[in-house]
Image (cartoon, rainbow, N blue to C red):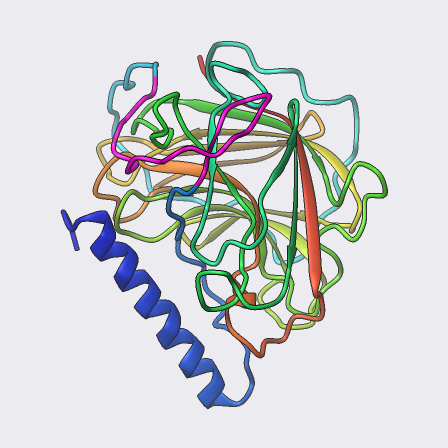
Amino acid sequence: MTGLPLRWTTTLTLYAAAAMALASCGGGGGAAPLISPASGSIPAARHTGPNPHNTPTPSPTSTATPAPIAAATASPKPTSTSTSTPTSTPTPAPTTASSGTVVWKAGDATYGHWITANTYQCGNPVQSGTQFTMSLSQGPAPGGGYCGRNQANPTDSSGSMIRLNFGQQYTWTFHYIDGTPADAAPGMGYDKDARSLIWQINPYATGSTCTQFWIDNGGVIGGPQQWDFKSCGVSVWRGTYTPGEVDDWKIVVVPSQTSTITGHITLYRNGVQVASYTGQNVSGSTGNPWWNFGPYKWIWETSPNDSTMTTVNATFQNMLLTTP
């Protein structure tokens, strides 16, 4: 589908989602396949940093990233540092704030613009300064189908998606509260089928979403729940998850989908490096990829399903994206 207009791709995505729903109903079990979700979101209302407001949104066509593309190097064979069993991670001092050129910054009048997703989007992110709180419940989605996400898509000042240059290093830092700041509940919750994500890098127009920050059950419905940071099907890192937990995350990514650029991911949890991965982390993108954040529980887009949660929520504070 290289080069197809965005409206054609969106239509095909909706047809695919409908086909998945029919297939799940025919199978009788209602469980969605244990695969990565599509990137699936289209611009809706546009917002600025401290005072969100609705405005018309243009198509995400710009590549507004201030840093230059890094020189290309040869790509080694991907390797994984994943483990079959979640491992505990100590909690030392919070992650040191990133320094460098600001690409996007929550709550900033210049760099903090965003729009809501609208494919299977239910509700809207609630912003208060540098804080975003998103709540999501199972049920019919306003645009048809069933609720699956409550996400924010960062944009530049014109309303176009923040696009990521292949070969350029990017660093995300944010303080994560699994729930709301008031009670840290229910968070993403203990769930029989916990498959969901809170952050992702999406291919542009076509392709599969590769780099995602999941919560799942280790590939087994009803299995132990865990964090699972994925890159093109590889579990880069798995770690303990507890509903209501609070963490400082730092994600460093060099986007790549070809062997001419060495892709890389480094993940830090509460100041401790927990993963380092080299390999492809974008797939099938016809342009520079983009990113978004917020709870996305795609299994809810199929009804019935095996999820035992009916509502989830998450809070992101001081979300910051920089380049060196």
- Is residue 259 depicted above or below 107 in this figure? below
Near-viewer residue (153 or 237)? 153
- Which residue is at a point 39% across and 50% down the rendered structure image? 209
Q: Is residue 48 left or right of residue 250?
A: left
Residue 9: quadrant of the picture: bottom left
Q: Is residue 268 magenta?
A: no
- The quarter of the picture where the C terminus appears is top left
Q: Let me know if residue 86 appears in the view.
A: no
- Is residue 64 depicted above or below 13 in this figure? above
Q: Is residue 288 left or right of residue 238?
A: left
Q: Is residue 47 magenta?
A: yes
- Is residue 47 depicted above or below 300 in this figure? above
- Which residue is at a point 47% across and 14% down the rendered structure image? 110
- Residue 21 lies, in percent from the top left, at 44, 76
Residue 194: quadrant of the picture: bottom right
> Magenta region, mostly helix, strand or loop?
loop
Q: Magenta region: which residues?
A: 45-65
- Is residue 307 depicted above or below 153 in this figure? below
Near-viewer residue (147 or 235)? 147
Q: Is residue 208 left or right of residue 150?
A: left
- Which residue is at a point 63% across and 72% down the rendered structure image? 221
